[in-house]
Image (cartoon, rainbow, N blue to C red):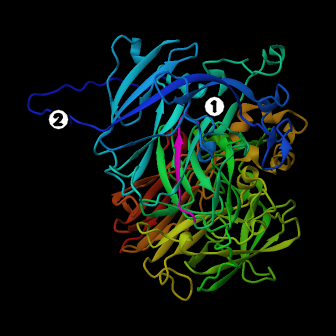
Amino acid sequence: EGTSALYQVRECYKYRPRRRESRNVRRFYLAAEEIDWNYAPSGLDLKTGKPLTGTSVPSSYHTNGACMTYKKARFVQYKSRAFRARVPQTRQEEHLGILGPVLRAELGDRLIVTLKNTIPFPYNIVFVKLFFSDGPGVSGGSVQPNQVYTYTFDVPENLLNDTKKPCKSFLYTSAHDPTRDHITGLVGPLLVCRKGYLNSGESKPREFFLLLSIMDEEKSLYPPPNVTTGSDATATNTKFGKYGRINGFVYGNLPGLSVTVGEDIVWYVMSLGSVIDVHTATFDGNTFTEEGTRRDGRSLVPGVTATLSMRPDNAGRWMVYSDSTFARSNGMFAFYTVSECADTRRGDPKNNGKILEYYISAEEVLWDYAPLTRALVTGENLTDPNVDGSIFVRHDDLFIGHLYKKVIYRGYTDSTFSYPIESSRDILGPALIAEVGDTIRVTFRNNASRPYSIHSHGVQTRYLYSSGLDYGSASQVGPGQTFVYVWKLPERSGPGAKDPNCIPWLYSSYVDPVKDKNSGLVGALVVCRPGILDSYGRRKDVRRELYIYMSVLDENLSWYLDDNVRMFAPGRVGTDYRSDPEFEESNKKHAINGRLYGNNDNNLVIEYGERIVWYMMVLGSQIDLHTIHLHGHTFIHSSEKHRADVIHIFPGMAEAVEMTADNPGTWLLHCHVMDHIFAGMETVYTVLKP
């Protein structure tokens, strides 16, 4: 909406950049060609095996029956300027889907790209991070229908200065009409490597390129109705949906993601799109490293790419997805299969550490988002209708208020589940703390009224049914039932070389990932380097550990919405309350650890001079991009190698930051997104005077 500008670079006689007279030249011949693209060739949600005409998917997916085929355009590579013989796609490239071919280059190369336009719209090509000049005689640098034009691009010599990896991925796309061109399909990956790498004899990893993007077909160059099967009559009044695609496929239909245990893999993950394209590319079952840090999810915004190295050790069929609830609910997930070869087959993975026992139940409670009904930061009375936050605590016949039926994880001392462990972390479940090499056994009892599970990021599970996930043979634990999860913590579950001594992972219920999390089931697992914990499971390198969980908990997506309406808003019973925008807004709780406006349990109290660690965690949708700001102090985020007081965290991510409490006082801790502050996502912490 106008967020763009032009800037001009002029040459100065005092500084003239040295230009290379000779460059290695690589020539590419690309054409934009129309295709009939099917987002889901199987017609199924391959997580559930159910047809995409069912009620479990957005209605726009099946307005025209099972048809999900659209007219689109794609970059196709040819062998010469004659544009007669295509460069064949290999089996390894099957996963590219709608993406254009992978164009490979090295530092200092010159790319000469000849484009042929066979579609009825003008387009062009731009490469992110490369130098280029607009071509003469072509309006706006674009190629008109039925024209051919040649562009020249130069790869900067310093493009890989920020990485030790041999290669990095970038994007190329058409920028004639940036939004429509990309949604139509005109996008592909560029791989830039250090000099001499591409033709070297050194061992190279398997490469996969994944583009996460929400596609709004109403903004395509081929506007709806353009469905190539089915009648226009049924499509005329259709509002076509937003497809959460990975490489142009939805609901697990992306083919070609097959690897073996112990194989070196590089995932090049990318994103393009709009304000809703806030993604955390997440890999179930295995972890990856990036520049010395170890995670299983990578944050992405439009235009960002990342290089993730993985050596899978967990055989099975695992999901890769966006951890934004909106994107995932709209089909943004795929499956990758990890197979065992004869020389990699093993029994149960062996760890040399301790076996740690935890006892956790799921229990339904009445949860109070604002026990004091006032804002602790401003002192305002939240029941005053003139106060900004009153909508979130309003309680009468038509609004639920601040008290909701929810479900939480609660820790117990032993398998009898007789003695609960006191917690000062509000809605968060018990903290599970271990070291690399340990094994965690979680005895889970479901005392709630519907099935739930526990799935933890980062751990190794021998069997899928012990993962707590919502697909394959994974288990769900029914009401009144008990299940024992066994999680191994090999080196790949712990901190990377540039991580702090301990890193946090999130755990939650995955019977329905969206509803379960919004209903309240979430907790933290912390994995440390060997020797960091004392005999009581406490860190020896810091004095205090504090947990911050930020999320817009959407009670409209909770399993208990109908119960809460019956109990607390009886005037809504029998009405279409789900379609009332004011009621919907009142149920979106911008919470820190499940509390609004600083109404947290008083556990954020620190002694002067203490070395502390904050475990920062986020779950939610595309609006859950949180900039967590600590007033009064700065912290060290070791993977970033600098001091700051704000850290950006995306949905599905968890980070650890460390600080020394050297500034006495009561200080604000909040999300720096203004809408989130106004809605209650703020609290305070106190550093006592010496």
Of the two numbered discs 1 and 2 in the rendering, the one whose residue sits closer to the viewer: 2
Asked whether residue 270 is drawn in magenta, I would say yes
The image shows residue 672 at horizontal and vertical percentages of 47, 46
Name the foreground residue: 625 vs 399: 625
Residue carrying label 2: 17
Question: Disc 1 to disc 2, how far (Cα)?
Answer: 41 Å
Residue carrying label 1: 215
| Residues under numbered marks 1 and 2 in contact, where contact means CB atoms less than 8 Å apart | no
The image quadrant of residue 543 is bottom left
The residue at the point 47 percent across, 42 percent down is 304
Name the foreground residue: 240 vs 660: 240
Above or below, 384 relative to 163: above
CA neighbours of label 2 inside 10 A, class few (<14), some (14 to 19), many (20+)? few
The image shows residue 95 at horizontal and vertical percentages of 63, 44
The image quadrant of residue 353 is bottom right
Mark positioned earlier in the residue sequence (1 or 2): 2
Quarter of the picture containing the C terminus is bottom left
Amino acid identity at mark 2: Pro
Point out which mark residue 562 bears.
none
Asked whether residue 195 is drawn in magenta, I would say no
Q: Specify the segment rendered in magenta.
A: 263-276
